[in-house]
Image (cartoon, rainbow, N blue to C red):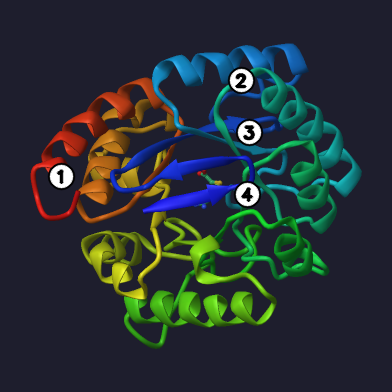
Amino acid sequence: MELKCGNRSLDLSLPRVMGILNVTPDSFSDGGCFNSLDRALKRAEQLLLDGADILDIGGESTRPGAAPVSEQEELDRVIPVVAAIAERLDVAISVDTSSAQVMQASAAAGAHLLNDVRSFTRHGALDVAAASGLPICIMHMKGEPQVMQQAPHYDEPIEEAVFAFLRQQVIRCEAAGIDQGRILIDPGFGFGKSHEHNYRLLNRLEHLRSLGLPVLAGLSRKRMIGEATGVAGADQRLLGSVAGAVICAMKGAKILRVHDVRETAEAIRVVRATLKEGSEG
Ligand code: 8Y7
């Protein structure tokens, strides 16, 4: 299970850790501490030392209720960081964006993976993604971030809705010239989902594997974690988040998108050792 990522390749036979590198001033989880290029690079280096296999760089906050940023602002935040990391560090770079312009500039600056919570539905995004030749991650989301958590409702069981959505998106990607070997799928924890939806999806995560594509999952520090542990505050969700990552990895997720890389990587090493001795590895 090798994912070709431009000039790199990523072995996905066992789960990998993707570290989140936010370059937004309003990002809730790093308090906007890493805005300047220098600080972003330092943070990237640390994430690498901590055990990240991939860095996910994002300049637009997609948390519920977040304000959108202009395309120019996003370019200014993201591209210098992508270019600097591509030049200096030995790590796969993912860019979290919905903008075709940002995707194109990121690919040119040396990115290895395109991660779009809107599944390449914005104008031009799918074509740019196809032309980039890079792998992409498509994710289930219902509604837009500003409104998605207002009473999310599904007429069918959530796992069926997510499965059908992702299958449709895979067909759409293939029609645009992106073959399946370049597609990752993600259930989109927290994106237009209630507590029950999120946990039912987590409980049935292995069902997504029947689409035959590597699964990426992110539940790091999300509300669903705080709701289950009863611990308040996004900065108090470490243990719950690590537990969530371990569950996802045991259920077959190949990439875990997380804030707390050192702790998650340590836990995932136990999962890797376990899976290695089974039929899964
Ligand atoms: C996810 C994501 C976010 C996720 C993928 C947060 C950008 C919200 N969550 N991308 N992005 N999957 N693929 O709390 O779950 O980190 S932003």
Along the line of sight, which residue is nearer the eye, 207 or 88? Answer: 88
Q: Earlier in the sequence, mark 2 or mark 3?
A: 3
Label 3 – label 4 distance at C-alpha:
9 Å
Q: Residue at x 67, y 19 (%)?
A: 40
The outermost residue toward the bottom is 155
In 3D space, how far apart are the residues under numbered discs 1 and 3 (Cα atoms)? 34 Å
Residue 27, numbered label: 3
**Distance (Cα) linking label 2 and label 3:** 24 Å
Residue 153: x and y, percent? 44, 77
- Contact check, label 2 and label 4, Cβ < 8 Å: no
- State the CA–CA distance, disc 1 to disc 2: 29 Å
> Mark 2 or mark 4: which is in front?
2
The disc, 1 or 2, on the residue closer to the chain's N-terminal end is 2
Q: Kindly check if marks 1 and 3 are in contact, taking CB atoms under 8 A apart as contact.
A: no
Q: Amino acid at mark 1?
A: Leu
* Numbered circle sitting on residue 89: 2
Residue at horizontal 76%, vertical 51%?
103
Residue 81: x percent and y percent? Answer: 74, 27
Compare residues 229 and 2 and report the one nearer the observer: 2
The answer to whether any part of residue 232 appears in the image is: yes
